[in-house]
Image (spheres, helix red, strand yellow):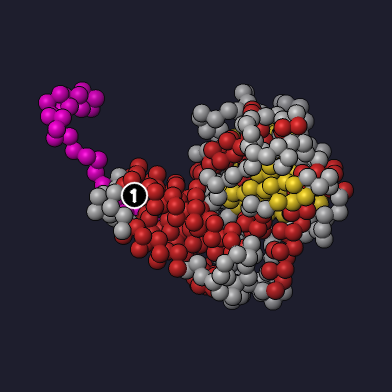
């Protein structure tokens, strides 16, 4: 095949080289396929985000070149993120009667837009790689991943916080993720530490998909803010939904993917793969550790939910073959099978972020926080017949967000700005 290709190239005039073939429209993804269900449609309608797909499609129809497409898609991704942040934080129209604190309109509107882009067939033609680049741009922009803007002021602490999309949607498409709701509520806000110093919070949201993590979405987003510079982070916290009725500060993170299906219904069971080209620690460690002030956070009395210093892991001990639960953390030389945050993407984002920290700025305080599970109120637990929201559901989401804000304030009160000689 190599010789035949070389021979054909030798006789073909360069002026007649064909352009890359335009890719056919792709089928909807598993996540996009859930858009037809009643719950997502009601969430979009009652928030006003049902217009996003139509508006995006009309704009795409006016695009005449790939360069224009790149600019338009990037702008629209960032605009969707900003619209979601503004709605949660009380700016602009609410668009409907769905409570403003809701993270779900952003998730479902993004999927409606990616579906539109995946099926778009412009006159100038799109290659598969070009369409993929546009989809990646829309994902990053609409998740806040490329708009984290930390201030350069040395008197301001800089905090990076991440949340997640809703997940386990096959079981209940009404689900919300309190970590994503907290990210929207906190983005661009300022809290005051115990000393009165301001701390600016910038946030981003990540997909619940194994493949995106393997492709480096976490490292690509966090690395610019972990590296030394005038806008470097002074503290980071990855956040996800965890156990009912409590917050957990996860002490230890493990280098193992346990295979539970993600939002794309894909499973991965393997050592956490580190993407090529990013700073990392070699050899790859089995465990990483939080550098959040966990004892101070646990003792602070931050809200109605208890906060636990969670130390349990699952390991294969050195020389052993079977997994063993360890309540007090891993033993020397062991192989990870679950960190404090389990073996799903909650644990993985904590592992990736703290591993990147260890490779770039080991003194940077950071780690993972698990929120309580967000549950529907009594009498509204059946996904087949239940309502998409209820007063208990809203109250618990708002309460979790406010306790996250308080926990971050406590953590920031223990941090030192990099300009003061730390990090």
Vertical relation: 386 (above or below) 53:
below
Q: Which residue is drawn at 85% across and 42% down?
A: 295
Q: Position of residue 182 (x, y in %)?
A: 67, 56
Q: Is residue 168 visible?
A: no
Counting labels gives 1
Give whichever of 129, 145 is nearer the camera.
145
Quadrant of the rendered structure where residue 149 is? top right
Q: Position of residue 330 (x, y in %)?
A: 76, 34
Give whichever of 259, 239 is nearer the camera.
239
- Would you say 28 lies left or right of 216 here? left
Vertical relation: 152 (above or below) 377:
above
Q: Residue at x 40, y 61 (%)?
A: 56
Query: What's drawn in magenta, residue-wise?
Result: 1-30
Q: Where is residue 125 in the image (x, y as percent from the top left)?
A: 26, 49
Q: Which residue is drawn at 73% across and 40% down?
A: 155
- The residue tagged 1 is 68
- Judge whether residue 414 is colored magenta: no
Name the quarter where the N terminus is drawn.
Answer: top left
Q: Is mark 1 on a helix, strand or loop?
A: helix
Vertical relation: 377 (above or below) 61:
below
Q: Where is residue 100 in the image (x, y as percent from the top left)?
A: 62, 67
- Would you say 60 lies left or right of 112 here? left
Quadrant of the rendered structure where residue 327 is? top right
- Would you say 107 lies left or right of 253 here? left
Q: Is residue 66 visible?
A: yes
């Amino acid at each position: 095949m190599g010789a035949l290709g070389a021979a054909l190239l030798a006789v073909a005039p360069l002026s007649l080289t064909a352009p890359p073939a335009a890719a056919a429209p792709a089928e909807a993804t598993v996540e996009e396929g859930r858009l037809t269900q009643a719950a997502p449609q009601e969430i979009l309608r009652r928030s006003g985000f049902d217009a996003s797909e139509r508006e995006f499609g009309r704009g795409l129809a006016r695009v005449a070149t790939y360069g224009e497409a790149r600019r338009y898609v990037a702008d629209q991704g960032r605009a969707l993120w900003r619209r979601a942040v503004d709605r949660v934080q009380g700016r602009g129209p609410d668009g409907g009667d769905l409570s403003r604190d809701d993270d779900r309109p952003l998730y479902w509107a993004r999927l409606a837009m990616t579906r539109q882009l995946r099926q778009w067939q412009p006159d100038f033609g799109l290659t598969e790689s070009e369409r993929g680049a546009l989809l990646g741009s829309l994902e990053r922009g609409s998740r806040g991943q490329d708009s984290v803007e930390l201030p350069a002021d040395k008197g301001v602490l800089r905090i990076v916080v991440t949340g997640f999309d809703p997940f386990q949607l096959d079981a209940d498409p009404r689900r919300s993720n309190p970590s994503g709701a907290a990210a929207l509520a906190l983005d661009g806000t300022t809290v005051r530490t115990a000393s009165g110093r301001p701390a600016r919070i910038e946030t981003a949201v990540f997909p619940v998909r194994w493949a995106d993590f393997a492709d480096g979405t976490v490292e690509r987003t966090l690395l610019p803010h972990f590296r030394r510079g005038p806008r470097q982070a002074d503290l980071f916290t990855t956040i996800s939904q965890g156990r009912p009725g409590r917050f957990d500060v996860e002490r230890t993170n493990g280098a193992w993917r346990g295979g539970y299906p993600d939002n794309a219904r894909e499973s991965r069971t393997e050592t956490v793969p580190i993407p090529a080209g990013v700073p990392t620690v070699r050899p790859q460690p089995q465990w990483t550790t939080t550098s959040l002030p966990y004892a101070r956070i646990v003792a602070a009395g931050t809200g109605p939910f208890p906060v636990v210093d969670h130390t349990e892991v699952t390991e294969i001990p050195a020389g052993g073959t079977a997994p063993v639960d360890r309540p007090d953390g891993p033993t020397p030389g062991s192989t990870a099978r679950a960190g404090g945050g389990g073996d799903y993407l909650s644990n993985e984002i904590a592992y990736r972020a703290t591993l990147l920290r260890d490779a770039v700025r080991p003194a940077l305080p950071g780690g993972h926080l698990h929120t309580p599970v967000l549950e529907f109120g009594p009498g509204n637990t059946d996904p087949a017949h239940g309502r998409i929201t209820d007063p208990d559901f809203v109250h618990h989401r708002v309460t979790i967000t406010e306790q996250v804000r308080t926990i971050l304030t406590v953590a920031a009160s223990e941090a030192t700005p990099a300009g003061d000689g730390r990090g």
